[in-house]
Structures are given as C-alpha cells and as structure tokens.
Image: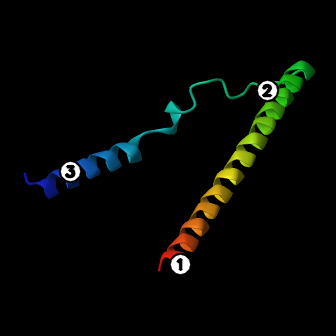
C-alpha cells in the first residue's frame, strides 16, 4: 500500500467508527435525577465566579500594558529609522 491508500484506509476506519458508535456511551449516569442545590452551594459557586472575575481584571490591565508597550516600541523604531535615513 502506498501512502495515499494508507491515509484513505485510516480516514475510512475513523469515519466508520464515529458513525457506528452509539450515544449510550456518553450517557452512563442516571439522567432522571433532579439535583437541587442548596443556598450554600449557590453561595460557593457565586464566590468562585467572583474570584474568576477579579482575577481577570489584572490580566486585562497587563494585556493592555503589553499592547501599548509594543505599539510604542514600534513607533519608536519607526521614528529612529526615519531620522537615520
């Protein structure tokens, strides 16, 4: 077999296995239960969301500083190049 035939055989095998696989493998748990969270669980999840949001603020500020620094560096290089020529 040459490389093209091997690649075709591999793609065919992958496609066949994806088509014939059943959805039952993904639904292994009990799907008929209703989980009702108490107020403490919701408070904990809200706290976790607050931590994520507060961690995003310094990341955005740092990203803004990096972008402005890169833009200033490019502007500085262009000015130096214009003076040199």
Element under disc 3: helix
Q: Label 3: which residue?
A: 9
Which of discs 2 and 1 lies nearer the camera? The answer is 1
Element under disc 1: helix
Spatial distance from mark 3 to mark 1, Cα to Cα? 59 Å
Residue located 73% across and 47% down the image: 60
Residue located 39% across and 45% down the image: 18
- Report x, y in % for residue 49: 80, 33
Quadrant position of residue 54: top right
Which of the marked residues, 3 or 1, is nearer the chain's N terminus? Answer: 3
Residue that extends furthest to the front in the rendered view of this protein: 84
Residue 8 versus residue 44 in the image, above or below: below
Is 12 left, or right, of 82 in this rendering?
left
Element under disc 2: loop
- Report x, y in % for residue 30: 66, 24
Residue 82 numbered tag: 1
Residue 34 numbered tag: 2
């Amino acid at each position: 077999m040459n490389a093209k035939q091997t690649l075709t055989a591999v793609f065919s095998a992958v496609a066949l296995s994806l088509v014939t696989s059943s959805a039952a493998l993904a639904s292994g748990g009990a799907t008929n239960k209703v989980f009702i969270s108490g107020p403490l669980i919701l408070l904990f999840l809200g706290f976790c969301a607050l931590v994520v949001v507060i961690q995003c603020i310094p990341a955005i500020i740092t990203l803004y500083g990096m972008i402005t620094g890169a833009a200033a560096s490019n502007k500085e290089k262009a000015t130096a190049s214009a003076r040199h020529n």
